[in-house]
Structures are given as C-alpha cells and as structure tokens.
Image: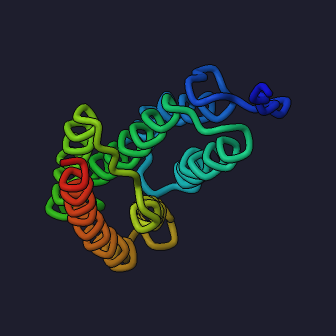
Amino acid sequence: MTASVPERRAGSFGPSALATPANALTAARLLLAPVVIVLIVDRGAAWSTLAVWIAVAASDALDGWVARRQGKTSSGAFLDPLADKVLVLGALIALVAQGSFWWVPVAFIAVREVVISGYRSYVGRRGVSVPARQWAKVKTIVQEVAVGFALLPLTSDDKWVATAVLWIAVVLTLVTGAQYLLDGRRSQQRAL
C-alpha cells in the first residue's frame, strides 16, 4: 500500500512559496510605508493622510486573511512583521518629528520592537520558534489606531485621545515583549 499525497487546492501555496497574493500585499505595504511617512511629515493631520494610513494599515488584515485561505509561507512569516514594523515605527517617528507625539513612548515601542525582533531571530537560528500570540497582534492594531487618532483632523488640536491610545500601545508593547522572552526561554528549556 502506498501513501497517498494530499491534493492541493487550486490557488493554494506551499510554505516555501514566495510569489503569492498575500506576499504581494505585504510587499505593497512595505513599499508604501515611505509614502505614508512623507505624507505625515508634509501634511500632518489631514483627511488625505488618514485615508492613506487606513488603507495601508488595513492591508495587514487583508494579507493575513489571504494567507490563511491560500497557505501561509515562511517568506510571509518574515515579511509581514517586517512590513508592520517599518510602517508603524516610520509613522510614529514621523509623528514625533512633526510634534504630534512625545518621543519617550515612541522610544519604548521602537526599542522593544528592535530587541524582540533580534531575539526572535537569535533563538530562531538555534531552532527555537517563538510565534506571535494574539496579544501581539492586538498590540499592532492599537499602535495603528494611535497613529490614526494622531492623523484625524478632528482631534489634531486636542491630542489626549491619540496620546492615551499611544500609552496603551506602550503597555501592550512591553507586556508582549516580556511574553516573547518568557516563551522563548520556555522553548529553549524544552529543547534541552
């Protein structure tokens, strides 16, 4: 008796695929990040900037939806968080440069993102996987919402809403960073 090979659905992709619709959406988000940053610096809180921000940030949910239906790929697992970080950190730094956000909460977020990305890469090279938890996805959404409130013309003179959401994002960013470290440590101990 021979083992049967499962048939792949039409339009689905294996884990090593690179040219997929989900990866194309992720690449577009990555390539549009500089456009968003220039709009933030040039126009600040404006309806046009907010509309572009919402469209580009929403592509994160869309590429995830497509990937779940057509097959997740290792390239997508790398590109998606990279695009998220470039877009969100670029927007936050642009908002600091523009005077909409104080640099301290943005620095907390930036340092955590760099440290945890480096940590995940480090342990990954040693065969330890530290996948994103649901709270890390919520953290990214809250960061995107903070940027959205800062770009909303109706709240541009009164920044307390955007600032409050930003500090919530900082808390989630630090908590999920600690969770990554704990998960990585547990995974390393199990591997021994």
Let me know if residue 97 appears in the view: no
Relative horizontal placement of residue 3, taking residue 121 as reference (left or right): right
- Quadrant of the drawing holding the N terminus: top right
Relative horizontal placement of residue 55, taking residue 12 as reference (left or right): left
- Which residue appears at 60% of the width and 39% of the height? 72
Let me know if residue 58 appears in the view: yes
- Which residue appears at 34% of the width and 45% of the height? 129
- 140, 31: nearer the viewer: 140
- Which residue appears at 72% of the width and 38% of the height? 70
Residue 56 placed where, x, y %?
A: 57, 44
Residue 178 placed where, x, y %?
A: 21, 65
- Which residue appears at 23% of the width and 60% of the height? 186
Residue 46 placed where, x, y %?
A: 51, 55
- 158, 113: nearer the viewer: 113
- 3, 151: nearer the viewer: 3
Residue 188 placed where, x, y %?
A: 20, 50
The part of the image, by quadrant, that contains residue 183 is: bottom left
